[in-house]
Image (spheres, grey):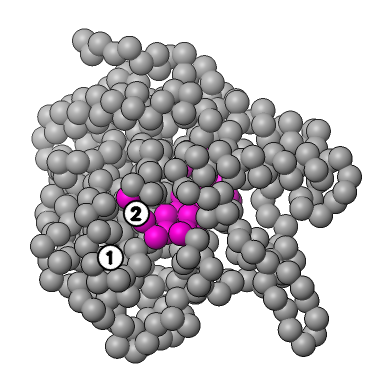
């Protein structure tokens, strides 16, 4: 029996969706790396916003606009404190990690020359590959890739060899969404800085499991999506050091981001507004702060310890299934298990699991280069959250066994 002080059954009471059935079976939600579920504490904040103080921010003199502005700015400060940014205007609200990365990639267009180099890791999400490829096309800069081992760990010595005075930017995820690997980002950043290169860390997959301290990491940029940390979709943040954010040109033009507009010349607003053109997802920004409040109430240390138990238990039970192979066996990983069973197509397993109420992701997980590396079309990915139980792991394992016997 696994003994844990973590009261997962009480936590599950906060998530209305976990009570529903799928195909006549209790839902077992194991697609948390794609999006997390929403506790009623966050749903209440969303209902309260639209019921009581929905208004545009930073503009109106009226009470509702003031209230909405206050709550939105309080949320920014909450997020600043959570990630330990030095200043609240270093937190830019965006529509999520993809948007955040594009702001930086676009901003560097005017700062790069043809002979410059950009380094990315071999285990990036497409949203941390494609914007840089587009940047290279615009500027002529070259993209270099940090290779990885068969365990799904970056080959850090190879990274050191890639670094040079030509390196201007380095991009790496903090945690891989496809393999669960926790990357040594502090080391990656410190070594890039020796060559004066800026580093963007994609924190989308780390934020649900690790409370990152952007100052301790010395990250130049850090990106997060709210929907993976108990918040709503379509909102997230870009953290950037003040000096970098001042240096980069704005990404989009429009309302909110200007200081003064005439037809001759427009001057831009100060941070953070320079990067926040148009009416933002106000409710989403407020709800993102509520999601972090919720997770902090449980505590990130408790979450990490419990998820590690889930990971160890699930890994052991899954590996007992003959023919099952796990991709991503790094020593340091979060509770993500990517696997295949023999030569059975991951989609076929996923479909049978769905019939049994088990929600997993199948396919390339927006990381096709990783699948090419392992020479597979994709994997079945079970990704766990702090609200999953050991019993749900058992349901998953039985469902995989059933799928295997039906398909082989
Ligand atoms: C989810 C995820 C993204 C993309 O986030 P969006 O919210 O879709 O913009 C990027 N990188 C990683 C590692 C992710 O897990």
Mark linked to residue 193? 1
The answer to which image quadrant residue 84 occupies is top left
The answer to which image quadrant residue 383 occupies is top left
In the displayed structure image, the side of residue 85 where residue 45 appears, left or right: right
Are the residues tagged 2 and 1 within 8 Å (C-beta)? Answer: yes
- Quadrant placement of the N terminus: top left
In the displayed structure image, the side of residue 29 where residue 51 appears, left or right: right
- Quadrant placement of the C terminus: top left
Q: Which residue shows up at 53% across the image and 30% down it?
A: 293
Q: Please, what secondary structure does the residue beneath circle 2 have? A: loop
Mark 2, residue position: 218
The answer to which image quadrant residue 160 occupies is bottom left
Q: Which residues are magenta?
A: 217-241
Q: Is residue 266 above or below residue 406?
A: below
Residue 161, percent from left and from top:
13, 71
First in sequence, mark 2 or 1: give its number: 1
Q: Please, what secondary structure does the residue beneath circle 1 have? A: helix
Which of 242/152 is in front? 242
**Residue 335: in sight, yes or no?**
yes
Residue 358: in magenta span: no
């Amino acid at each position: 029996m696994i003994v844990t002080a973590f009261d997962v059954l009480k936590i599950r009471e906060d998530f209305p969706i976990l009570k529903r059935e799928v195909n006549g079976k209790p839902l077992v939600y194991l697609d948390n790396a794609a999006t997390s579920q929403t506790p009623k504490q966050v749903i209440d904040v969303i209902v309260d916003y639209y019921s009581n103080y929905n208004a545009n921010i930073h503009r109106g003199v009226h009470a509702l606009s003031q209230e909405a502005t206050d709550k939105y700015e309080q949320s920014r400060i909450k997020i600043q404190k959570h990630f330990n940014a030095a200043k609240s205007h270093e937190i830019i609200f965006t529509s999520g990690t993809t948007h955040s990365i594009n702001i930086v990639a676009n901003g560097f267009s005017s700062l790069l020359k043809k002979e410059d180099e950009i380094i990315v890791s071999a285990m990036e999400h497409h949203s941390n590959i494609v914007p840089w490829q587009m940047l290279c096309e615009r500027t002529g800069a070259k993209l270099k890739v940090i290779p990885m081992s068969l365990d799904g760990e970056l080959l850090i010595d190879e990274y050191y060899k890639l670094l040079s005075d030509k390196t201007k930017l380095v991009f790496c995820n903090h945690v891989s969404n496809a393999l669960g690997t926790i990357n040594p980002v502090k080391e990656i950043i410190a070594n890039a800085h020796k060559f004066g290169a800026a580093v963007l860390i994609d924190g989308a997959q780390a934020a649900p499991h690790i409370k990152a301290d952007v100052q301790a990491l010395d990250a130049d940029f850090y990106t997060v999506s709210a929907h993976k940390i108990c918040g709503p979709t379509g909102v997230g943040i870009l953290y950037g050091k003040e000096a970098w954010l001042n240096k980069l040109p704005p990404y989009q033009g429009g309302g909110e981001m200007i200081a003064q507009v005439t037809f001759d010349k427009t001057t831009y607003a100060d941070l953070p507004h320079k990067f926040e053109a148009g009416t933002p997802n106000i409710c989403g920004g407020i709800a993102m702060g509520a999601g972090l409040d919720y997770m902090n109430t449980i505590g990130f240390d408790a979450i990490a310890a419990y998820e590690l138990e889930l990971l160890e238990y699930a890994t052991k039970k899954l590996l007992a299934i003959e023919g099952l192979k796990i991709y991503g066996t790094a020593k340091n990983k979060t509770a993500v298990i990517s696997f295949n069973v023999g030569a059975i197509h991951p989609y076929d397993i996923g479909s049978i699991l769905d019939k049994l109420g088990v929600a997993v992701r199948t396919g390339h997980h927006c990381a096709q280069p990783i699948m090419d590396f392992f020479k597979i079309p994709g994997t079945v990915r079970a990704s766990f959250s702090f609200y999953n139980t050991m019993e749900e792991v058992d349901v998953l394992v039985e469902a995989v066994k059933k799928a295997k016997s039906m398909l082989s």
